Image (tube, rainbow, N blue to C red):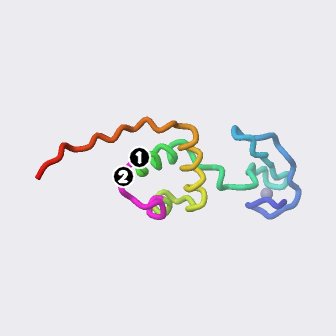
Amino acid sequence: MQCPSCHSEKVIKNGRIHNHTPKFACKACGRQFVENPQNRISEDKKALIDKLLLERISRAGIARVVGVSERWLQSYVNQKYKETPRKVQVKKPKASA
Ligand SMILES: [Zn+2]
């Protein structure tokens, strides 16, 4: 384990963040960080992703725009669908023509 700022190995465990990811602190420069920065997607970003998911934009496009990895986005979407039972009712337009 190395500090991402100064690359010192004088790193200590410093509790956990909200999603139980261990948090570390560098004794050399005082920087605090988590091991996997992928987990640090802000709630703002998630809200934006939620909006973009409603548009007809490919997941790859969303990932590029928001600045997350496609892999992360995929797992985020999977998790979301698991949490939210599908309540969306698709109203079929009345047959015309
Ligand atoms: Zn450091």
> Dot 1: what SS?
helix
* Label 1 Cα neighbours within 10 Å, binned few <14 / some 14-19 / many ≥20: few
Ligand 1 rendered quadrant = bottom right
Q: Quadrant of residue 5?
A: bottom right
Residue type of the residue flagged with mark 2: Glu
Nearer-the-camera pick, 26 or 13: 13
Quarter location, residue 16 = top right
* Label 2 SS: loop
Q: Looking at the rendering, in which quadrant would you find the N terminus?
A: bottom right
Q: Position of residue 39 (x, y in %)?
A: 66, 50
Query: In this picture, which residue range is highlighted in magenta?
Result: 54-62
Viewer-proximal residue, 73 or 30? Answer: 73
Q: Residue at x 59, y 49 (%)?
A: 41
Disc 1, ligand 1: is the CB inside 8 Å? no
- Name the residue carrying label 1: 51
Label placed on residue 55: 2
Identify the residue at image location x=85%, y=46%.
13
Q: Residue at x 80, y 49 (%)?
A: 24
